[in-house]
Image (tube, rainbow, N blue to C red):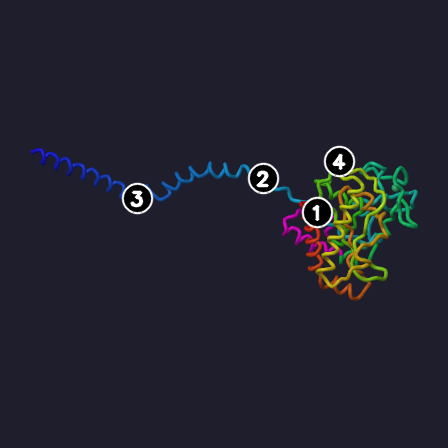
């Protein structure tokens, strides 16, 4: 009798389990229970884990490189509005458009206007730099091509790149070009650019590539002591020029270091380390061939040279 009682209980229990299975099977068939019913729970569990592991990792600051393709639109083709918009000033005393070579000693963004400055200038020059002194044929386009190629490679390497001009139809003053050293061009703040790289090509009877060396007294206020400003700038120029000479058919002009122009406006006014490259001579036939056909390699060499500079700093 006892055995029979258990058997009846077992049959009822199996019947309930079978009924349950039939109900679940029915729900799966009509779509009430799907794979997502369980996945949703899994996702809810994994979300807090992902957030917790993402928190400690910060994106490292991108280093900022200002690339400055030298020269631009011929000043003879610029209207007064063009000149003014591009940062040039009209001086009745000097009889035309130009810009001041220095800041007042110990300041930035306060033009010397001919006094209260270091007074350093090239032979035959002055505190005033006339706009027409920057007019060039051919060179603006060569400089822009090399610059755009350098930008491409630097961005591939993870740098933030700012250009001082984007076309050959503009010609910013040196002073205006330096505003790209600041976030949003706000010169009342500290400069956030790491380096400023001027990209030029030479002329006047020579061959090969060189960087223009800084030397002597620079008295603009800024983030670096004057001696460090000079040494950092010259290391940057040398590393880039070395890379150009090793990667292209261009030779080194005067051992790659040109001493003759330490009073350049950009050297006297830059708030960050600055390299000034004279890449080949565009009035030399074989250099011009390299400049015309091998801008890609030149641009890559500029990028590698800049990258080498930051590697020497991180060691
Ligand atoms: Zn001056
Ligand atoms: Zn030039």
Report how far apart the C-alphas of labels 4 and 2 lie in the structure: 28 Å
Q: Which residue is mark 4?
A: 188
Nearer mark to the viewer, of 4 and 2: 2
Mark 1 Cα shell of 10 Å, populated few (<14), some (14-19), many (≥20):
many
Q: Which residue is mark 2?
A: 58
Q: Which residue is mark 3?
A: 28
Q: Are marks 3 and 1 in contact (CB under 8 Å)?
A: no
Report how far apart the C-alphas of labels 3 and 1 lie in the structure: 60 Å
Asked if disc 1 is less than 8 Å from ligand 2, the answer is no
Asked if disc 4 is less than 8 Å from ligand 1, the answer is no
Return the residue found at the far front: 315
Nearer mark to the viewer, of 3 and 2: 2
- Give the x, y percent position of residue 147: 72, 54
Q: Which residue is mark 1?
A: 65
| Nearer-N-terminus badge (3/2) | 3
Q: Secondary structure at mark 2?
A: loop
Q: Secondary structure at mark 4?
A: loop
Nearer mark to the viewer, of 2 and 1: 2
Please state the extent of the stretch shown in magenta in the rendering. Answer: 143-166
Q: Are marks 1 and 4 in contact (CB under 8 Å)?
A: no
Report how far apart the C-alphas of labels 3 and 4 lie in the structure: 68 Å
Q: Secondary structure at mark 3?
A: helix
Residue located 75% across and 43% down the image: 272
Report how far apart the C-alphas of labels 2 and 1 lie in the structure: 21 Å
Nearer mark to the viewer, of 3 and 4: 4
Return the residue found at the far left: 1
**Magenta stretch holds residue 144:** yes
Horizontally, is 271 left or right of 94 in the view? left
**Magenta stretch holds residue 113:** no
| Nearer-N-terminus badge (1/4) | 1
Residue 233 shows which numbered tag?
Answer: none
């Amino acid at each position: 009798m006892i055995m029979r009682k258990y058997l009846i209980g077992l049959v009822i229990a199996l019947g309930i389990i079978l009924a349950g299975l039939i109900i679940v099977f029915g729900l799966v068939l009509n779509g009430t229970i799907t794979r997502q019913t369980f996945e949703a729970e899994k996702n809810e569990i994994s979300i807090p884990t992902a957030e917790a592991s993402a928190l400690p990792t910060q994106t490292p600051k991108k280093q900022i490189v200002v690339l400055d393709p030298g020269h631009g639109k011929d000043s003879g083709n610029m209207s007064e509005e063009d000149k003014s918009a591009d940062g040039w000033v009209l001086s009745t005393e000097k009889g035309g458009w130009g810009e001041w070579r220095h800041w007042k000693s110990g300041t930035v963004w306060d033009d010397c206007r001919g006094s209260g400055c270091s007074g350093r200038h090239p032979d035959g020059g002055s505190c005033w730099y006339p706009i027409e002194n920057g007019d060039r044929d051919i060179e603006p386009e060569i400089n822009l091509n090399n610059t755009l190629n350098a930008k491409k490679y630097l961005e591939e390497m993870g740098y933030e790149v700012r250009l001082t001009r984007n076309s050959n139809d503009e010609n910013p003053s040196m002073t205006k070009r330096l505003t790209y050293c600041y976030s949003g061009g706000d010169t009342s703040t500290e400069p956030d650019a790491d380096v400023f790289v001027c990209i030029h090509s030479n002329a006047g009877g020579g061959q090969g590539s060189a960087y223009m060396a800084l030397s002597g007294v620079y008295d603009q206020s800024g983030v670096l002591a004057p001696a460090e400003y000079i040494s950092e700038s010259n290391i940057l120029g040398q590393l880039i020029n070395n890379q150009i000479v090793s990667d292209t058919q261009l030779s080194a002009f005067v051992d790659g270091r040109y001493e003759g122009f330490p009073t350049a406006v950009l050297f006297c006014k830059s708030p960050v380390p600055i390299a000034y490259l004279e890449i080949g001579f565009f009035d030399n036939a074989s250099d011009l061939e390299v400049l015309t056909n091998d801008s890609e390699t030149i641009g890559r060499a500029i990028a590698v040279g800049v990258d080498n500079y930051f590697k020497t700093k991180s060691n």
